[in-house]
Image (cartoon, rainbow, N blue to C red):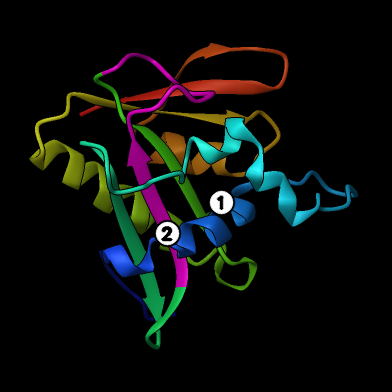
Amino acid sequence: MEYTIREMAEEEYFLLDDFLYEAIFIPEGVSPPAREMIKQPELQVYVSRFGQKAGDYALLALIQGKPAGAVWVRIMNDYGHIDDRTPSFAISLYKEYRGHGIGTALMTAMLKKLRSEGYEQASLAVQKENYAVKMYKKVGFEIVDQNSQEYIMLCRL
């Protein structure tokens, strides 16, 4: 599957709402939540006023010119928060584009971007059951903490 990855333009930031919904991990056999779920404050921290804070970066994967996935980071007090100098990751792909290496490429490209911007580390939180844990480890993230449902992972840049 051919794809390109580029920086997301400011006029495309509205797509982050859609990708935020797609990023919600839904275990096998569980019905997807209502889309309105992304309006909850603990999820809005990922997208609200995106691009207006230092450290807000987003990359977009395109297939035949159409959005297929996105990765974005910001320094925020989210589930994977480490400190106020460590960007937290969010990533998602539309279902039909998962399993083709696009997520790995997006993560790798964003880690490269963060290195070039002078960041020393990046973090994320992921549910223990999520198949993406394997991919996060593959690109350099390590488990540094956990609770009953999630891992907190850190990648040293």
* Quarter of the rendering containing residue 151: top right
Q: Which comes sooner in the sequence, label 1 or label 2?
A: 1
Percent across and percent down for residue 18 are 57, 61
Identify the disc placed on residue 20. Answer: 1
Label 1: few (<14), some (14–19) or many (≥20) C-alpha neighbours in 10 Å = many
The residue under the point 47% across, 49% down is 91
Magenta stretch: residue 76 in it? yes
Quadrant of the image containing the C terminus: top left
The residue under the point 65% across, 12% down is 147
Magenta stretch: residue 12 in it? no
Camera-side residue: 13 or 70? Answer: 13
Percent across and percent down for residue 61 are 37, 68
Percent across and percent down for residue 56 are 28, 43
Q: Is residue 129 above or below residue 25?
A: above
Q: Is residue 97 above or below residue 48?
A: below
Identify which amino acid the numbered label 1 is placed on. Answer: Leu
Camera-side residue: 122 or 28? Answer: 122
Q: Is residue 107 above or below residue 128?
A: below
- Per the image, the residue denoted by label 2 is 70
Q: In the image, which residues are magenta? A: 68-84
Identify which amino acid the numbered label 2 is placed on. Answer: Ala
Camera-side residue: 47 or 98? Answer: 47
The residue under the point 35% across, 65% down is 60
Give SS at disc 2.
Answer: strand
Percent across and percent down for residue 134 are 53, 39
